[in-house]
């Protein structure tokens, strides 16, 4: 696979804006371990090898057990995920696949059981942000190293 274009070089101000949003999400107080799981799951759904590779490496560096990471793709069948993580992963899938799911009430009700309104808002922005990054990487054909 060959990279199509370099979005950061072609539109540096737009790329910087997405980077600033990502930084704001990280600084919002969102749980770092949940953020890693969200980014990994959305990237898996979106077929973004560049982002999957990056988020696996970041997750391991931040202490998430290596055994847990490949199981993110099958989180419903694994006992390694607690109820809070399951709610966040369900919400991630619902919002990443929003054209198919419509962000159903069941997923929202589940996430409300484990998160405050502020935390749900953080999750929404975090999920939206990783989906932006995935679209940049996949459409540009970024290649992981």
Image: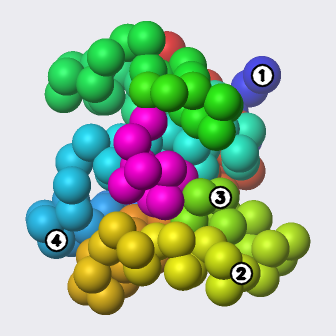
Secondary structure beneath disc 4?
loop
Which of the two discs, 3 and 1, labels the residue nearer the N terminus? 1
Q: Give percent across and percent down for residue 9.
A: 45, 53
Residue at image location 59% in from the left, 50% down from the top? 42
- For marks 1 and 2, give the one nearer the viewer: 2
Residue at image location 39% in from the left, 42% down from the top? 82
Give the crowd class for mark 4: few <14, some 14-19, many >=20 residues within 10 Å. few
Q: CA separation, marks 1 and 2? A: 36 Å
The mark found on residue 1 in the picture is 1
Q: CA separation, marks 3 and 2? A: 11 Å
- For marks 3 and 2, give the one nearer the viewer: 2
The residue to which callout 3 is attached is 93
Magenta part, dominant SS: helix
The mark found on residue 124 in the picture is none
Q: Quadrant of residue 131?
A: bottom right
The residue to which callout 2 is attached is 104
Stretch of the chain drawn in magenta: 81-89
- Please say whether residue 135 is one of the residues in the magenta stretch: no
The residue to which callout 4 is attached is 28
Which of the two discs, 1 and 2, labels the residue nearer the N terminus? 1
Secondary structure beneath disc 3?
helix
Secondary structure beneath disc 1?
loop
Secondary structure beneath disc 2?
loop
């Amino acid at each position: 696979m060959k990279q199509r274009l370099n979005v950061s070089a072609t539109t540096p101000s737009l790329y910087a804006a997405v980077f600033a949003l990502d930084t704001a999400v990280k600084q919002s107080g969102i749980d770092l371990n949940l953020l890693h799981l969200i980014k990994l799951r959305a990237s898996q759904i979106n077929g973004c090898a560049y982002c999957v590779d990056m988020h696996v490496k970041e997750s391991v560096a931040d202490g998430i057990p290596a055994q847990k990471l490949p199981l993110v793709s099958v989180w419903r069948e694994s006992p390694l995920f607690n109820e809070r993580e399951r709610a966040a992963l369900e919400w991630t899938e619902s919002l990443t696949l929003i054209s198919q799911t419509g962000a159903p009430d069941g997923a929202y009700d589940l996430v409300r059981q484990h998160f405050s309104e502020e935390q749900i808002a953080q999750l929404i922005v975090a999920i939206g942000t990783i989906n932006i990054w995935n679209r940049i990487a996949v459409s540009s054909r970024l290649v992981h190293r």
